[in-house]
Amino acid sequence: MEIIMDKEPITINGLNNLKTELENLKNVQRPKVVAAIAEARSHGDLKENAEYHAAKEQQALIESRVIAINDLIARANVIDVTKIENDGKVIFGSTVKVKDLNADKQISYRLVGQDEADISKNLIFFKSPIGKALIGKEKGEMVSANTPSGEKNFEILDVEYI
């Protein structure tokens, strides 16, 4: 049975961040935890050895993250919006300046992949409620999104491919 993995859209910046994290996990974190396990082993009885169990748990977390990053990189569909002609439509990777009609303030969102999403940096997952509401819309359109904190209404002021 063949398993077909969906391609995951990602920005160039997002891919570079994943590669940096992977290098750090492989070349810094993994050797540290291996050394911690060896150190804890030297203390004798492993059943009662909290340091050993903590280090083994840390090792499992690192290995699962390495696997997850390798999977993301393998499925990455890198989208460079700077190379796409801007027709005013909101697409993956675009930066959208909106007016939040509920809060009467302007916000710029960048639509990114799940691994890059960080609301504190206004990087929103393109499949999030706001992301889904914005995708495919154009400058000047009114958009409504049902978010966990209630309905939000926006006017799209500008769409940039930067």
Image: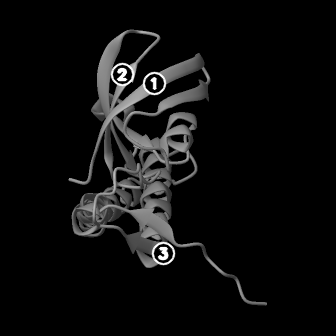
Residue shown at 34% from the left, 67% from the top: 79
Above or below, 27 relative to 126: below
For the residue pair 28 and 14, the one nearer the viewer reads as 14
Residue 141 vs residue 97, the one in the foreground? 141
* Secondary structure beneath label 1: strand
Q: CA distance from mark 1 to mark 3?
A: 32 Å
Of residue 8 and residue 41, the one placed in the foreground of this image is 8
Task: Give the side of residue 27 with respect to residue 116, left or right.
Answer: left
Q: Is residue 23 left or right of residue 64?
A: left
Q: Earlier in the sequence, mark 1 or mark 3?
A: 3
Q: Amino acid at mark 3?
A: Arg
The residue carrying pointer 1 sits among few (fewer than 14), some (14 to 19) or many (20 or more) residues within 10 Å by Cα, namely many
The x and y percentages for residue 48 are 54, 44
Q: Earlier in the sequence, mark 2 or mark 1?
A: 2
Whether tag 2 and tag 1 are in contact, CB under 8 A, the answer is yes
Quadrant in the rendering for residue 44: bottom left
* Residue 134 x, y percent position in the rendering: 48, 40
Q: Which residue is mark 2?
A: 99
The local crowd at label 3, few if under 14, some if 14 to 19, many if 20 or more residues have their Cα within 10 Å, is some
Question: Residue under circle 3?
Answer: 75
What's the residue at 22%, 63% (across, down)?
82
Callout 2, which amino acid? Lys
- Find the residue positioned furthest to the bottom: 1
Asked if residue 94 is positioned above or below residue 97 in the image, the reply reads below
Mark carried by residue 154: 1
Mark-to-mark CA distance, 2 and 1: 5 Å
* Residue at 50%, 52% in the rendered image: 57
Residue 71 placed where, x, y %?
49, 72
| Proximity of marks 3 and 2: CB atoms separated by less than 8 Å | no
Q: Quadrant of the N terminus?
A: bottom right
- Category of crowding for the residue at label 2, using alpha-carbon neighbours closer than 10 angstroms: few (below 14), some (14–19), many (at least 20): some
